[in-house]
Image: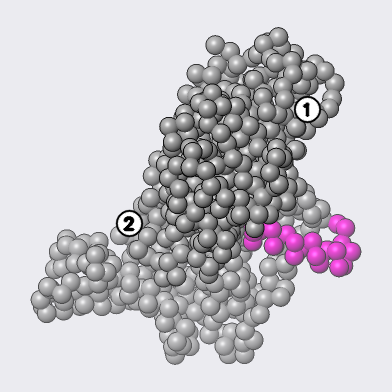
Amino acid sequence: MSTLIPEAQLPKELTPDQAADVAYSSELAQAAADLARGLPVLIECDKDLSPFLFMSLRGRLKQSNLQCLYLDGRPRGQEPQQPGATFVGTMLQQLRDAVRGSVEKKVVVLPHIDLLTTSQGGLTAEAREVIPLLYENPEIVWLGFKDPSFPLPKVIENLFPRRASLLGIPRDKLKQLITQKESRKFGREFNPWGLYKYVSGMNAVRLRKLLSTLEGEDYPGDPQPAYQRVRTATLGSTLEVPTIDLEKDIGGYAQVKKRLRAEVLDVLAHKEKLTSPEEIARIEELIPKGMIFWGPPGTGKTLFAKSMASAIGAAVTVISGPELKSKWVGESEENLRQVFHQARKSAPAIIVFDELDSFAAARGTYTGSGVEHSMVNQLLTEMDGFHKDELVFVVGTTNFAEILDPALLRPGRFEFHLHIPYPDAEDRREILQIYDKKMGLKMAPETLEAAVKRSGEYVLGAAPGTRYSGDHLNALCRAMARFRLRENQTGPSTPADVERALTEWLERPSLTPKEEQVVATHEAGHAVVSLFCKHAPPIDRISIQGDFAGALGFVQHQDPAHKYVTTRGDLLDRLCILMGGREAEQLLMDDLSIGSAGDLDRASDIARALVESYGMGGDDIGTVAYHDHEQKGRRDNLSPAQLEAIDRRVREMLSEARERAAQILQEHRTLLVTLRDLLLDQKVIEAKTIGDLLSKK
């Protein structure tokens, strides 16, 4: 079966009331049957749709000899029209008359029942008078119309045992809602499902108004302009489709892009080519509607969501988690409801919840007012209410996927998890190339490599352990662009420009010559010991410029060849290298500074882990894990003798590492002195300089 519809099978003319009756025929038939049986009905729909639904229901109820009384505050005798000004006071009087007047069975229509509440679902002064009236006369059958933007209090909702939600257009009805003349704007072979993704959130009356004013030539060779005009109309004035290309505008991250394409974009692209309703329905079952993009700050999680929107022509709404919260009861949930309502009206759409963990952390871990619990429940309700044929996606971005509420992560909700880590060297190279082109930096190959290399270190001036993200690379390139603009530089950027952009405004400690000598000796000690430990990765850079967070100097190693397996030899070499700075000070200066305090902390942790956790303390200690992972401390059930043996072995391992470092430095004292003096002279030594120095020695 094909979804392509011959023009002759489409209606020639179609009025708005006919469109409403066709689009929601089954729901209206059920509502009329319920009303005829005396069951009140509440219909959730857009304001401009409710008059047409009422007229359809009124015609159906005449067959059951039921009269309808329409209470909207207008003078009696006027037919309901498009909603305009309503008079709550007059409406209240009409309601009193209806309830306390005739006793015959009748259907009383409340077209604006949501006016009885505030936007937060609380009761207004009028509502407190209306509620007793609604329950006073059992002979009245109520028909209420509710705007989806406003919640109703439970005391009013409970009055209606039958409810219908007429939001958007049923996909299988779309072919009955477009005329022959209008279909010609979309080519000779009209595929209503191709149009559906742009109008799924519109009601039938609004769709008729849009299509009846659609301009353009008949049977165009390219129907895309017609689809684009429809898409522009459904976006409204506040939303837009981003123009971010997944390949051209986002550098690197080949694996992330591959998975996003394979799991989502390719599936959607395949669905667009199908013409069989059965095949389309089968494919829609495979598409995840909820996604978690997680990773460190600044790595482009929101950017990936926008590129996904660009690929499918979706509008994007980016919502910060904290801005949804409100101190007023119910307002936070109402904010969420409005976000989803707007997204459905603008489908295809993507809702991006930035900092999702700010309100969707695991329940039971909240430290706030408790509004987060209600917000999570509302979010789950909205996501569970998705229709499979709606192209509305929800993307939550977070730095901490592990703390999210498990209820959000089950299949059918946020089931697709995409990790976006810090960029590796190749990723950084591609990201820098994009910014180089956008900002006109004219990076020479050696400049680009210098930027890639320097951004492999920790971020200067940031919190300890912060690595370079895409945002940091953007900041680096903007800094270069600013001083090139100030100084009217038009030539190629140099590696010196990269260094300047990173360090020009960095606040560095002002060391005395004596202090510089201590720091240079310490770092040279680490470096020399590292050079003669076979498990240590090659040295990339040594600096005493104070340009490393929390340190006066540092030795930067290249990424290890083996990133996922750590051996006993690796850990013992780390112990030895950590002792190198302290032992160099002792050897060349016959004194010690407190600069080795951090080294000792890390060395002690490694030694204790070897003994207590990894079973590598030796035969006297045994191959036993003494560390209690659940209590994150040492076990209380160990005897004093066992504790003493563990502590003794930790001290022995540290002493062995110190003696080994001292021996290496004594054997290579000339190299140590040369490296120290070179550091004092140049402040920074790169890998090539170290290689040249070793070849000479």
Residue at 56%, 34% in the rendered image: 67
Question: Which of the labelled discs sits on residue 342, or is there none?
Answer: none
Residue at 37%, 60% in the rendered image: 363
Task: Give the structural element (helix, strand or loop) at label 1.
Answer: helix
Q: Is residue 421 above or below residue 226?
A: below
Q: Is residue 203 visible?
A: no
35 lies left or right of 423: left
Colour option used: one colour
Q: Which residue is mark 1?
A: 212
CA separation, marks 2 and 1?
Answer: 73 Å
Q: Residues within 10 Å of mark 1 (few under 14, many from 20)?
A: few
* Amino acid bearing label 2: Thr
Q: Which residues are magenta?
A: 469-491
Q: Is residue 128 visible?
A: yes
Q: Residues within 10 Å of mark 2 (few under 14, many from 20)?
A: few
From the viewer's side, name the closer residue of 322 and 501.
322
* Amino acid bearing label 1: Ser
Residue 21 x, y percent position in the rendering: 61, 26
Residue at 65%, 47% in the rendered image: 72
Residue 374 x, y percent position in the rendering: 44, 59
Quadrant that contains the C terminus: bottom right
Residue 488 drawn in magenta: yes
Residue 480 drawn in magenta: yes
Mark closer to the observer (2, 1): 1
Q: Is residue 54 above or below residue 132?
A: above
Question: Which of the labelled discs sits on residue 567, or is there none?
Answer: 2
